[in-house]
Image (tube, rainbow, N blue to C red):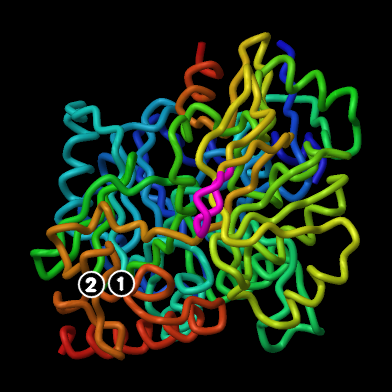
Amino acid sequence: MDNEAKIEEMNAFHKKIHENGKAAVVLFYSNNCPPCDVFEPVFDKYSMGYSKDINFLSFNIKDIPVVSERLMVRSMPTVIFMKAGEEACSRLSGYIEPSDLKEKIENVLGGICPKESRKKVTADVVIIGAGPAGLSAALYTARARLYTIVIDRAMPGGQVATTFTIENYAGTKGSITGPELVENMVGQVEEQGAELVELNEITEVDFSGKLKHVVSEDTDYYAKAVIIATGAQPRPLPVEKEEEYRGRGLHYCATCDGALYQDADIIVVGGGNSAVEEAVNLTKFARKVTLINRSDGFSATKSGQKKFFDNPKTDVIWNTEVRELKGEMFIDRVILENNKTGEKSEMAVDGIFTLIGMIPRTELFKGHVNIDENGYILTNENMETDIPGIYACGDVRRKYVRQIANAVGDGAIAAIFAEKYISSEDE
Amino acid sequence: MAVKVYSTPTCPYCTMAKKFLKENNVTFQDIDVSKDRQQAMEMVTKSGQRGVPVIDFNGQIIVGFDKSRLTHLISH
């Protein structure tokens, strides 16, 4: 669309909503949107009651894409209140309570609009975390025609988003890059009508009511069921000055920062799949990659190990741990200790990539659902936590195997039981 | 206003930062430090570290995708 057409659409919109100078209640809806269908008769009813004082207009967002984008209309349906060309009061979206609509209309008309900057959205299912588990759950709940919102503190994909290549996930042509797999999953989920909210940190939850409350930095979400899929974060290297050296030679994301180590000598700490695979990937940039492993063997798969040992740029030091980080501005050497002999040695390095496992992201849920001594959420095999209507799936749960394959499986199970729970509660 | 984003194509936080700037109508120069060594060195000198993204927002250096700091700089 050229610029002129865009301006024309905006102007036409403003002209239309303020015809005869009145304030306006503007409804944005989309096709295939269950809460829109529920809300339409409510909107019509109020439009009859109040149309003398305020204009009621409704638009399918596909007819006014420019306006929808400019006004950042993301949830369907959304009701916006406009007064003299400006947005007034805060908007309503998702499953909208008739009483909320009435209150807002009265406030706009009375000119007493309490300044609320927070939004309120009511959904069927809120999924916290958009990694493979959360996205898989969303795919199922959205296909069950439940209004689904997936919220992520960062970008979708979780740990997969920062993985170079994945070779152990079925249904790919042998291998797929992490970002590509994420893109596929996100596309599939959005296609089914789930809504994805990125970059939104959840600050609080309250699971005590029938409607569960999830508080983010700018929005209050309410849902009949909540699926926790917050995953895990890298375990920090257990040495002094760990925080001080982050980014100054110490890294946790090889995919992100590996390219900054062209022709460098780097070490990778760990011995599992991630460590061994990323060590091989880092040889694309580095001159030499030495793996520091605390035992005398890798726990990584045989095929991963083969690639490692076949690569001329890799090396390994067994039974050894990093004890100290040293260097002025950047790490330039480390003190290693052989944990069998106790012998210490110094090694010159340009950078360290640490891949020694993960810790669950469950700080937010402590005291709300059952969590084990290591921070993992306890569920049964239906992904149910001890609180009805609250589910957990993926790396955040206590289990033995943490792979993309079973994260996706967990998500599907959580969604199916969340759907059952919602339909039994709705009866 | 001059905004530079030092990034690598495989880093999701870089994508996120760039997306955030675009959404806020901030025009910026995108620098792929995996391709350009000289610029990579410039980034290390400016930020005193080697993690991406680094954002040079009118001379203010932001390491990582710090949304609240960016929001503050954009609105002032």
Asked if A313 appears above or below A95 in the picture, the reply is above
Image position of A260 (left or right of A38): right
Give me the residue at 71% from left, 39% from top.
Answer: A6
C-alpha separation, residue under disc 2 versus residue under disc 1: 5 Å
Residue labelled with disc 1: A124
Q: Amino acid at mark 1?
A: Asp
Image position of A404 (left or right of A9): left
Asked if A88 appears above or below A375 in the picture, the reply is above
- Tell me the chain of label 2: A
Which of the numbered marks, if any, corresponds to residue A224? Answer: 2
Q: Position of residue A61 (x, y in %)?
A: 56, 57
Image position of A181 (left or right of A342): right
Instruction: Answer yes or no: is residue A12 visible.
Output: no
The one of A348 and B72 positioned closer to us in this rendering? A348
Q: Is residue A104 magenta?
A: no
The quarter of the displayed image where residue A113 is located: top left
Q: Amino acid at mark 2?
A: Lys
- Under circle 2, the secondary element is strand
Give me the residue at 61% from left, 12% from top.
Answer: B60
Quadrant of image for the C terminus of chain A: bottom left
The quarter of the displayed image where residue A181 is located: bottom right
Mark 1 or mark 2, which is nearer the start of the sequence?
Answer: 1
Q: Position of residue A388 (x, y in %)?
A: 15, 79
- Under circle 1, the secondary element is strand
Q: Which residues are magenta?
A: A336-343
Asked if A288 appears above or below B32 in the picture, the reply is below
Which of the numbered marks, if any, corresponds to residue A42? Answer: none
The one of A57 and A209 positioned closer to us in this rendering? A209
Q: Position of residue A348 (x, y in %)?
A: 73, 34
Image position of A414 (left or right of A197): left
Give me the residue at 42% from left, 46% from top.
Answer: A200
Q: Mark 2 near mark 1, Cβ–Cβ under 8 Å?
A: yes
